[in-house]
Amino acid sequence: MLDQIHWLAAVTILGVLEQAYFFLQVIYSRRLFGISPPKISGPPEFERIFRAQVNSSEYFPIFLALLWQAGLFFHQGLAAALGLLYLCARYCYFMGYKTSSSERLAPMYFSAGVLWILIAMSALGILHFFLSHYVGLNILQLLTA
């Protein structure tokens, strides 16, 4: 079983480390600008870093659910590769947003596109599972016949 999920687990750990890095950036930014919790407003530089971290945190559970569903029901390697692309895009998003709010747009759109691909992979994989296990219709055999 572990050989079927090790790439997904590795991408998950990398994602958690990335989230930790984003959290640390907010802590450093709070210290730099003298903004104590629970305040969330301050100079534009701080607010951009804070928003980038919050936005990334909001999408992280969605990413994890889709990564694991696509990996388990469709293809582990492809899902893990897309997961790495997503994490790279979120890093570029964070760094772009840190610089300027307009710099976040291209990585944001790219990461959203990766999520849509993971949604499609998940849906196709789950559909294939239900059709083959409950209806007895194996689409892969029909396509190769």
Image (spheres, rainbow, N blue to C red):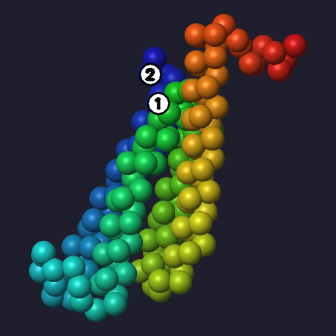
| Residue that badge 2 annotates | 2
Q: How far apart are marks 2 and 1 (CA)?
A: 6 Å
Residue at point 34%, 88% (across, down): 45
Residue type beneath disc 1: His
Residue 138 position within the rendered picture, expressed as x and y whole percent measured from the top left: 71, 13
Residue at point 42%, 44% (across, down): 64
Residue at point 44%, 71% (across, down): 94
Residue at the limit of the structure toward the front, as seen here: 135
Q: Tag on residue 6?
A: 1
Residue at the limit of the structure toward the top, as seen here: 136
* Pointers 2 and 1 in contact (C-beta within 8 Å): yes
10 Å crowding of disc 1: few (<14), some (14-19), many (20+): some
Residue 14 vs residue 86: left or right? left
Which element carries disc 1, helix, strand or loop?
Answer: helix
Q: Which of 133 and 31 is in front in this view?
A: 133
Q: Nearer the viewer, residue 18 or 134?
A: 134
Rendered position, 2 above or below 141 = below
Residue 13 position within the rendered picture, expressed as x and y whole percent measured from the top left: 38, 44
10 Å crowding of disc 2: few (<14), some (14-19), many (20+): few
Which element carries disc 2, helix, strand or loop?
Answer: helix
Rendered position, 134 above or below 48 = above
Residue at point 46%, 30% (across, down): 6
Q: Classify residue 137 by image quadrant.
A: top right
Residue at the limit of the structure toward the right, as seen here: 145
Q: Nearer the viewer, residue 94 or 57?
A: 57
Q: Tag on residue 115?
A: none
The answer to whether residue 49 is visible is yes
The answer to whether residue 77 is visible is no
Instruction: Report the number of discs.
Output: 2
Q: Which of 29 and 113 is in front in this view?
A: 113
Rendered position, 32 above or below 84 = below
Quarter holding the C terminus is: top right
